[in-house]
Amino acid sequence: MKKFVKTLLKIVAAGCTLIAVALVATTSVNAVASGIEGGRIEAYGQRVAVDGRQMNVVVAGDAGDTVVLLPGFGTAAPALDFQPLVDDLAKDHRVIVVEPFGYGLSDGTDRERTTENIVTEVHSALQALGAYNYVLMGHSIAGIYGLEYAERYPDEVTAFVGIDTSVPGQPGMDTQFPTGLFAAVKNLGLMRLVAAVGGVGYELPAYSDEAREQIALISNRNSLSPSYLDEMAHISTNFEDALGAKFPEQLPLLLFVEADNSNNPDWIGLHERQASEVADGTVIPIDGEHYLHQSHAAEIAADFRAWADERV
């Protein structure tokens, strides 16, 4: 029995040593690669001063009404992610993509990622651009931020358009994420390893090889960053604070929604109830997955134009 125990301990010790060596290797590779990749990221858009930091925005098109695009949580490079939709809408609109702090080429921040702070910062960026009347169009968690935004700046927001947006009271948003563990995963280089194996997506023809490469580089930098993790830590409280919130009754509301959400059979119902709370609410189901603007940009742009034309 003593011999068996000694052998077992040796095996465990060898295994731990191998794991330690592997983690040292992934940590070193991550540090070196991060330094190299920083020089390969190509600048796009323009930077505006907000709260003593620099926020990156992209402006495209110069005709028609202004559409402001806000990303879903964790979208590494919003301007590149939205590119197919931006290209279409910019034909007859002024389109502004805002990359909040911690996203895209914007600086990180140590301010808490509460809905209040995020909304204030986005609004400051738009003021710096001279944007005072616009359609607010957002993806995913932008539906939660958009509620407060429209409530605080009703004289500026002319309509809200959601792209599979989050809704107050949707199930599963009270989860407490292990952000400390995720930070360790980032620092040990394991996130980079996962990305290298699984990729970052964007395999659709709408995205060029160059765009995919830049998204991968920016994703390695931004994913599980301190700003990212702080926003993750605030998801449950931001959703809790939004309970009972509604868009202003007279604000036109257009919601593009994933038609078949297997994780939430009442997904369309949640959005239909939200749309019924305003005087002019429309829900358009789309056969696609959560990032509808990646695969259905032309359809979203066309339906938005038709919807907007009816309200002129």
Image (spheres, rainbow, N blue to C red):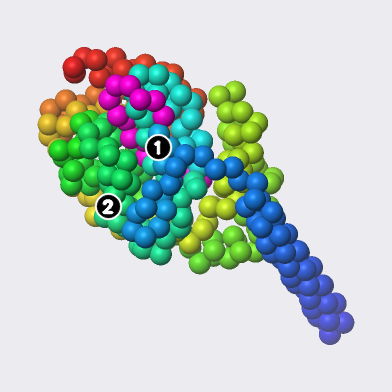
Q: Relative to 226, does residue 163 appear above or below in the rendering?
A: above
14 falls in the magenta region: no
Q: Relative to 25, does residue 170 appear above or below in the rendering?
A: above
What is the number of the mark on residue 120?
2
Q: Which residues are magenta?
A: 60-76
Between 128 and 307, the residue placed more toward the observer is 128
> Which amino acid type corresponds to the residue marked 1 in the rendered image?
Val
Q: Secondary structure at mark 1?
A: strand
Residue 267 seen anywhere in this rendered image of the structure? no
Q: Secondary structure at mark 2?
A: helix
Provide residue 263's location: percent of width, then percent of height.
43, 38
Residue 252 seen anywhere in this rendered image of the structure? yes
Q: Residue at x 22, y 47 (%)?
A: 148
Quadrant of the rendered image containing residue 26:
bottom right
Q: Quadrant of the N terminus?
A: bottom right
Q: Earlier in the sequence, mark 2 or mark 1?
A: 1
Q: Relative to 298, does residue 198 appear above or below in the rendering?
A: below
Between 56 and 118, the residue placed more toward the observer is 56
Q: Relative to 54, does residue 20 appear above or below in the rendering?
A: below
Q: Is 72 situated left or right of 66 in this image?
A: right
How packed is label 2: few (under 14 Cα within 10 Å), some, or many (20 or more)?
some
User: Can you name the residue that lies furthest to the bottom here?
Assistant: 2
Q: Cα distance, mark 2 to mark 1?
A: 16 Å
> Which amino acid type corresponds to the residue marked 2 in the rendered image?
Thr
Q: Residue at x 49, y 46 (%)?
A: 104
Q: Are the two marked residues, 2 and 1, in contact with CB atoms closer than 8 angstroms?
A: no
How packed is label 1: few (under 14 Cα within 10 Å), some, or many (20 or more)?
many
Provide residue 186's location: percent of width, then percent of height.
59, 60
Q: Quadrant of the C terminus?
A: top left
Circle 1 residue:
97
